[in-house]
């Protein structure tokens, strides 16, 4: 598993510090660039404007161009941007106003405002990077979020964002700010679990959530925003999927993609696994019906987090590799599979004893 924390020497700082690691010979373009000065077997020493600090445990790993955030008094740095990865996500808050039955990032009450640091980190990312923004619920800090997106756009128009949000906190007052964003560079990932309001509300643990979501989606639509609709498959909405496909294809046909997602066994999903996980390797019918309805009406549907061998051959082209590299693994029988290079594999916390019944190399 790829580590998102690196051991470092503590710096004499009072505020969080964002630095970009640079190899010798790379031009230090900003005051935030730390240049490699010395390499030892288990330590790399960097120079940051006259201050030296070490990064440990990365002897075999390429970290040139990575963006770190160092905290006062701490000996581990947050690896905010990995230059060699397409899977970088900024966790901007752990607060949320929902309690989804399968939440992989259970909410916390407190909030540490690091939007300034996240803005700088995104501005130091490699050319053309797409950066995820997640929570919690980012729109609970809507003004700070918009300021970050706007500032990075002004500094680095080549940078894109994929923002995960329940979309319940948009208002008409946000319309102009949404319109000013580059819709080709900002994709809003919004969950919808059922077209039956009470079922969606029950899954997210919040009465009235469906109604608020519809209002938020209408604002995104009128602003011309790019939308990735996200539906996690579970026992609680299994029978609802064909009706949801009908709703999506008739009411939300402005969307960019409808992502039908398998469950991630962590957080609340792990606690509720036996009552939530739907084994789609043994019964794929409802997903097949939903995909058929959507595609017949011109909606792009994709299957996220589905190992290819859990999907019938006729639908495997709908299943791209989507699990982030830092939390992806392959099982023993994957080693000889001819589809390994295109398969997203499994989450690190997937348990084969409680997972798919019918799997095997293709």
Image (cartoon, grey):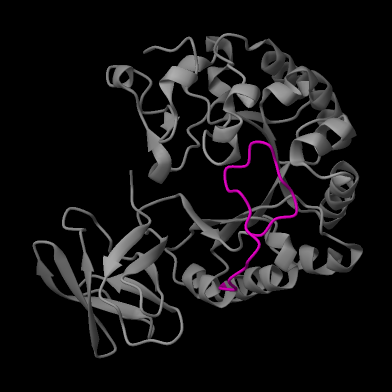
Q: Quadrant of residue 62?
A: bottom left
Q: Residue furthest left?
A: 41
The x and y percentages for residue 316 are: 53, 18
Q: Quadrant of residue 47?
A: bottom left
In which quadrant is the C terminus drawn? Answer: top left
The x and y percentages for residue 51 are: 25, 87
Residue 54 is a magenta residue = no
The residue drawn where x is 88% and y is 62% is 171
- When the figure is inspected, residue 101 is found, relative to residue 85, above or below; the finding is above
Q: In the image, which residues are magenta?
A: 95-114
Tell me the chief SS of the magenta region.
Answer: loop
- When the figure is inspected, residue 286 is found, relative to residue 319, above or below; the finding is above
The residue drawn where x is 34% and y is 79% is 33
In the shown orientation, is residue 251 left or right of residue 120?
Answer: right
- When the figure is inspected, residue 163 is found, relative to residue 7, above or below; the finding is above
The residue drawn where x is 73% and y is 14% is 289
For residue 257, say whether it is visible. Answer: no
In the shown orientation, is residue 283 left or right of residue 74?
Answer: right
In the shown orientation, is residue 210 left or right of residue 158?
Answer: right
Q: Residue furthest bottom?
A: 50
Q: Quadrant of residue 150?
A: bottom right
For residue 159, say whether it is visible. Answer: yes
Give the camera-side residue of 242 and 313.
242
Residue 112 is a magenta residue = yes
């Amino acid at each position: 598993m790829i580590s998102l924390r690196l051991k470092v020497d503590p710096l004499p700082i009072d505020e969080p510090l964002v630095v970009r690691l640079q190899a010798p010979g790379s031009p230090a373009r900003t005051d935030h660039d730390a240049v490699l000065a010395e390499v030892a077997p288990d330590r790399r020493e960097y120079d940051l404007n006259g201050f030296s600090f070490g990064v440990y445990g990365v002897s075999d790993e390429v970290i040139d161009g990575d963006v770190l955030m160092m905290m006062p008094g701490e000996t581990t740095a947050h690896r905010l941007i990995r230059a060699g990865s397409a899977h970088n996500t900024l966790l901007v808050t752990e607060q949320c106003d929902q309690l989804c039955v399968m939440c992989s990032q259970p909410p916390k009450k407190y909030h540490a405002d690091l939007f300034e640091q996240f803005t700088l980190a995104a501005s130091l990312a490699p050319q053309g990077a797409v950066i995820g923004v997640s929570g919690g619920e980012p729109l609970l800090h809507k003004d700070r979020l918009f300021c970050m997106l706007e500032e990075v756009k002004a500094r680095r128009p080549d940078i894109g964002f994929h923002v995960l949000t329940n979309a319940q906190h948009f208002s008409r007052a946000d319309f102009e700010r949404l319109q000013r964003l580059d819709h080709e560079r900002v994709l809003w990932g919004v969950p919808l679990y059922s077209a039956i309001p009470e079922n969606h509300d029950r899954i997210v643990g919040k009465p009235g959530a469906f109604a608020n979501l519809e209002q938020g989606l209408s604002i995104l639509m009128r602003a011309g925003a790019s939308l990735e609709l996200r539906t996690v498959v579970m026992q609680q909405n299994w029978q609802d999927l064909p009706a949801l496909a009908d709703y999506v294809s008739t009411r939300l046909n402005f969307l960019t993609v409808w992502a039908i997602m398998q469950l991630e066994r962590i957080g609340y999903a792990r606690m509720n696994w036996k009552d939530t996980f739907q084994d789609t390797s043994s019964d794929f019918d409802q997903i097949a019906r939903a995909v058929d309805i959507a595609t017949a009406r011109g909606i792009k549907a994709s299957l996220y987090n589905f190992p290819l061998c859990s999907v019938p051959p006729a639908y495997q082209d709908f299943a791209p590799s989507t699990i982030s590299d830092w939390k992806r693994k392959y099982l023993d029988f994957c080693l000889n599979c001819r589809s390994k290079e295109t398969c997203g594999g499994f989450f690190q916390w997937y348990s084969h004893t409680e997972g798919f019944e019918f799997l095997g190399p293709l």
